[in-house]
Amino acid sequence: MAEQRWLPLESNPQSFNAWSQSLGLNTSEYEFADVFGLDSDCLSWVKQPVKAVLMLFPVTKEYEQMRIEQDKKVEEDGVEGVEDVIYFKQTIGNACGTFALLHALSNSGVPLQEGPLTELFERAKDKSPRERAALLTESDELATVHENAAQTGQTATPNLEDEVDLHFVTFVNHKDHLIELDGRRNSPINHGPIKVGLLEDTAEVVKNVIELTKSHQFNLVTLGPASQDD
């Protein structure tokens, strides 16, 4: 059976907010916003408390080698502290943006209006990561919202069959631990207890990935309190 493919989402807070608002997020309370740098001054501009961080980054040979080695260790040893995290295995091509949003909204504790998304998360609780992903293929509304968001970015929309070498992952605070959620992995990754804050600790992980990939083609977006600016 051919792999199901969706148009890739752009790393764009406006698109993320439209996607999330369509499915029950009150963006007058919580919204997605850009992070403009990893130094302490730029991080201090971000409104707190941050509920989730989405990272877009290039999938390089060096990163893939690290991921494969880490996934083998996960298969052997497992990961502690992630048993009740809602984690979706990515089984749809180019859909990492939607999976990142699902991971953010299902594990951040932000309130959502009852609807398709809250129903999906409730059904997902007692299922495996692959079974949760199968639920997505049953949701015509989710596919439609994704397609609409993918076509409203600031750059040209790629073709459905295009291979994209950029990937989204999500970071959340789960029981005071920094958890990375990536649908391509074997499990959520527990980076250990949060030392400073979700955003600050995520920034340190991002710096390590930048050093590994030798690339600065990164973008960070937070989910946090909405700005009250007019």
Image (cartoon, rainbow, N blue to C red):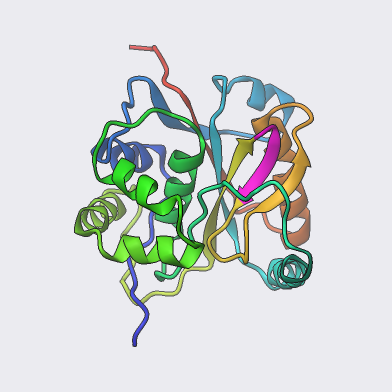
Residue 11 can be seen, yes or no: no
Is 101 in front, or is 94? 101
Is 124 in front, or is 44? 124
Q: Position of residue 163 (x, y in %)?
A: 44, 74
Residue placed at 54% from the left, 20% from the top?
47
Q: Position of residue 2 (x, y in %)?
A: 34, 85
Q: Where is residue 198 in the image (x, y as percent from the top left)?
A: 66, 32
Residue placed at 31% from the left, 54% from the top?
150
Furthest residue toward bottom: 1
Q: Quadrant of the C terminus?
A: top left
Check the image and report above or below for 149 versus 198: below
Residue placed at 51% from the left, 40% from the top?
107
Residue 179 included in the magenta stretch of the image: yes
Q: Where is residue 197 in the image (x, y as percent from the top left)?
A: 70, 27
Is 37 in front, or is 113? 113
Residue placed at 44% from the left, 29% from the top?
110
Please indicate whether residue 153 sits to the left or right of residue 40 in the image.
left
Q: In which quarter of the image is the N terminus?
A: bottom left
Which residues are the magenta region?
175-180
Furthest residue toward front: 126
Check the image and report above or below for 110 versus 19: above
